[in-house]
Each structure stands twice: as structure tokens, then as C-alpha cells.
Image (cartoon, rainbow, N blue to C red):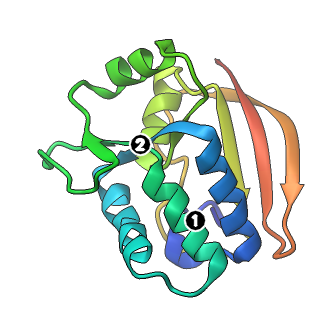
Amino acid sequence: MTLDGVCDHTSVNPDEEIHEHYRELLKSGDVALYGRITYQLMEYWKNVVENPTGDKAMDDFAIAIDRIPKVVFSRTLTNVDWESARVATRDLKEEVLALKEKPGHDILVGSRSLIIALINLGLLDEFQLMVHPVIAGHGLLLFDKINERTLLKLMKTKTFDSGAVLHYYEVGKKQ
């Protein structure tokens, strides 16, 4: 996200350190949830696995995202061709509740629309917000469709050499 709240991957320029951070996050997760649009953007990384760029951080990130199981929520996609992905057969609430009952690690959510929906459903436990030192000036706002006031408790922060700051929040009750 940019300083002015815009959620757009083209507005920021993640460096090697940020790719490394997210590679480690992907390695610690059990599954990643995506909406159709973000999933189709992420398919870029499947091509990087097949044709490495020579940039170690990007190539290692591509391997990590290729390996993690992905669940795609879509009204239009009926199948996906990425071996580690599947289209959800249940609605978001049912799918997440079923995943939460399984033993394991983290359920990662990589789409703005799913993050908002899970906050609105009260099913998000932790929220990691990377704020880049950029003002986009326009674009899709991350929090424009939250239904109710939701309290977040700051657990820690991590500052990157680029000036980006990662905020770790525990999601509290709606008020």
C-alpha cells in the first residue's frame, strides 16, 4: 500500500529485501487465498519459475509462490492451470472456516477484495500492512469497503532499507 492508502502493485517497486521477506512468509504458510484478478496477476511468477530472470530474489520468490497451495475465489473461472492452485468450491466464509479447522500454519490472503471480505466477516486474525514511501495520487483504496469500525492492535513493525514499513496488527472486535 502507498502512504495515501492506494493498493496497486504498479505504484510501488519492491526490492530484493522485500522479495526475501515475502518469500519467507510464503514458506511459512499452508495456503494462499486469491481473488481472480490477483491470481491472474500472480500467474506471472509461474513463468519466472519456468524461465528464471537471473535476479536471485525474484527467482527465489517465484519458487516459493509456485510451491504454496493456492485457492482462487472466482465467479467466472471454473479451472486453473497452475498445478498448485485450485478454484474454491465453497463460498469464502465456508472455505476459510474449513481451512481454519485443519492443523498447520498460516492462511495467507493475497487479494484486496478477500482481505476486506474477511475483515467484514470477522475472520481475519492478523493483518500485515506494508506501507511504501510513495504517494500514488489516485487508485484503488485498500479500506474503502469496510462495513464497520474495526480495532487493530499494533503488535510490531519492521522497517526495510527502502523506507517501506511493515505493520503487524492483531485484528480486534468490530465496534
Element marked by disc 1: helix
Q: Which residue is mark 1?
A: 61
Report the front residue among 102 and 7: 102
* Local crowd size for mark 1, using a 10 Å CA cut-off: few (<14), some (14–19), many (≥20): many
For marks 2 and 1, the one nearer the N-term is 1
Q: Where residue 39 sits in the image (x, y, percent)?
A: 35, 56
Residue toward you, 64 or 138: 64
Quadrant of the rendering where the C terminus is positioned:
top right
Residue 133 seen in render: no
Q: Determine whether, in the image, residue 109 is placed left or right of residue 78.
A: right
Specify the quadrant of the image occupied by residue 130: bottom right
Q: Is residue 58 left or right of residue 98?
A: right
**Of residues 95 and 50, the one drawn nearer to the viewer in this rendering:** 50
Residue 36 visible (yes or no): yes
Horizontal and vertical percent position of residue 5: 62, 60
The structure residue drawn at horizontal position 43% and vertical position 71%, both measured from the top left corner, is 49
The correct choice, above or below, for 94 with respect to 107 in the image is: above
Q: How many marks?
A: 2
The local crowd at label 2, few if under 14, some if 14 to 19, many if 20 or more residues have their Cα within 10 Å, is some
Q: Quadrant of the N terminus?
A: bottom right
Q: Which residue is mark 2?
A: 69
Along the horizontal axis of the image, is 55 left or right of 169?
left
Q: Amino acid at mark 1?
A: Phe
Between residues 86 and 161, which one lies in front from this camera angle? 86
Kind of residue indicated by mark 2: Pro
The secondary element bearing badge 2 is classed as loop
Asked if residue 89 is positioned above or below residue 83 in the image, the reply reads: above
* Residue 102 percent coordinates (x, y): 48, 16
Measure how far apart labels 2 and 1 are at the Cα level. 14 Å
Residue 26 is situated, as x and y percent measured from the top left of the image, at 59, 49
Residue sitting at 38 percent across and 58 percent down?
38
